[in-house]
Structure formats: structure tokens, C-alpha cells
Image (cartoon, helix red, strand yellow):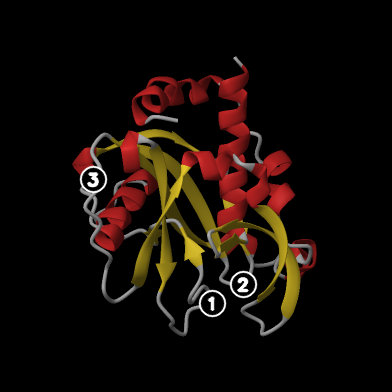
Amino acid sequence: MRFDAFSEIIGSINSHELPGKEAQLQMAPPFRDVLLKQTSHLIDNAKLAAVLALFYPGKNDNTYLAFILRKPSPDVHSGQIGFPGGKPEAEDFNLQQTALRETMEEIGVQSEAIQIITGLSEVYIPPSNFNVFPFIGLTAETPDFKPQISEVESVIEVSLKAVMNAKHQIITTVKTSYGLSVSVPAFNFNGHIVWGATAMILMEIIYLFNLILKK
């Protein structure tokens, strides 16, 4: 879909209720329920984080979505593909501001150039004890991405056409932060595997966009 058409209809996403778990659980790892039970005593004191699903005009003015490949590190999400985002800082007046600031820091897109469309359903991540608050945003100009050297290996650009194509939804084997190899639902975008919380967030976006297209 061309970005001009996308930008005209994406705002209507706010006329729909968030599907939440109905969408998220389609991409939830099979061991998630066990982890939630094991960490139930931690959830009330979970750390906060915010991420941004940023849409923009890419090749041939078609709509694209930006992901990041995180650099190897001691972090439990080391080397995984996700959305730009992170923890709140003292200067952030809300989690939306956190998502914007982190996006600027991690991929170099200025906050002033981004329009926030809506917030999505939060996702709790047991391995890191984070409650993640996602947002959908768009920028009208094709970004000149500048990955943060210390944290981001690369920016992965995926077309909306690919995101919405169910053939990219797969079952694959991944290695978890606990060192176990498990089969999980995931997205495969040209060999880039998106799973876990990011896949759960992405599925809610897909669900909402399908509702818009049905109108």
C-alpha cells in the first residue's frame, strides 16, 4: 500500500477497541503461561518500557515498518529483532515520550517528525520483568536511519505488504534467554525472525489494520 493511502486511513484505527490478548496470544510462545505463573509475584513491580512501531514511506513510496536488530550483549534480549524503545528517563513526561526519545536515540528519527497514532495493549515480558507499552507512529518523510552504535546492529525495513501477508507467519525453533531451544510462532521476513513480545505486538497491529480494511 502506498504511504499516502495508508496515512489517510490509519487514523481510523482509533475507532476500534484494542483486541489485546485475542490477537497477542496468536503469537505467544507456548511456554508463556508457565513463565507467567512462575513470575506472578513480580508483575506488580514490573519495570516499565515503551516501544514504537514506526511506519514511513519507503521504496516506491510504499508503506514500510522499522524494526531493529539488537547488538549482542549480556541483556536477555541480546541479538533479537524488536521495535525501537526502552526504559523511561527522568525527562520523559509519559511513556509516549519515552517511545519517541528512544526511537530518536536508537534509529535517528527526530521526535518532531513523528505523529503518534495510538497506543496498543501492554505486553508483560517474564524473562526481563518488563511491562512494555507499544505505540503506533508514522513519519511523512523517508527516514535517514542512523542506528545507535552501542545498541543497534541494523535497522530492518519491512513493507506493510509483507507484514500483512500470512505466508510470513511460521513456526520455528529459537533459543531462549534460558538457553533452551523451543518451537514458537514467529514472523519470517527475508530470514529475519520476529518472535516473542515483538511478534505479539505486531499481531495486534495486523489485527487492527485488517479491521480497517474490512470497512
Residue 58 in view (yes/no)? no
Point 54% across, 45% down: residue? 162
Q: Which residue is mark 3?
A: 111
The disc labelled 3 sits on which kind of residue? Answer: Ser
Q: Which residue is mark 2?
A: 127
Relative image position of residue 57 (x, y in whole percent): 32, 38
Q: Residue furthest toward the front?
A: 60
132 lies left or right of 68: right
- How far apart, in angstroms, are the residues tagged by discs 2 and 1? 7 Å
Discs 2, 1 touching: Cβ within 8 Å: yes
101 lies left or right of 158: left
Disc 2, SS: loop
Q: Quadrant of residue 114?
A: top left
- How far apart, in angstroms, are the residues tagged by discs 3 and 1? 27 Å
Query: Dot 3: few (<14), some (14–19), or many (≥20) neighbours within 10 Å?
Result: some
Instruction: Note whether 126 is above or below 210 in the view shown.
Output: below
186 lies left or right of 139: right
Disc 3, SS: helix
- How far apart, in angstroms, are the residues tagged by discs 2 and 3? 30 Å
Looking at the rendered structure, which numbered label has been put on residue 42? none
Instruction: Note whether 105 is above or below 109 in the view shown.
Output: below
Q: Which residue is mark 1?
A: 76
The disc labelled 1 sits on which kind of residue? Answer: Val
The disc labelled 2 sits on which kind of residue? Answer: Pro
57 lies left or right of 27: left
Discs 2, 3 touching: Cβ within 8 Å: no
Relative image position of residue 94 (x, y in whole percent): 35, 46
Relative image position of residue 25 (x, y in whole percent): 73, 49
Front position among marks 2 and 3:
3
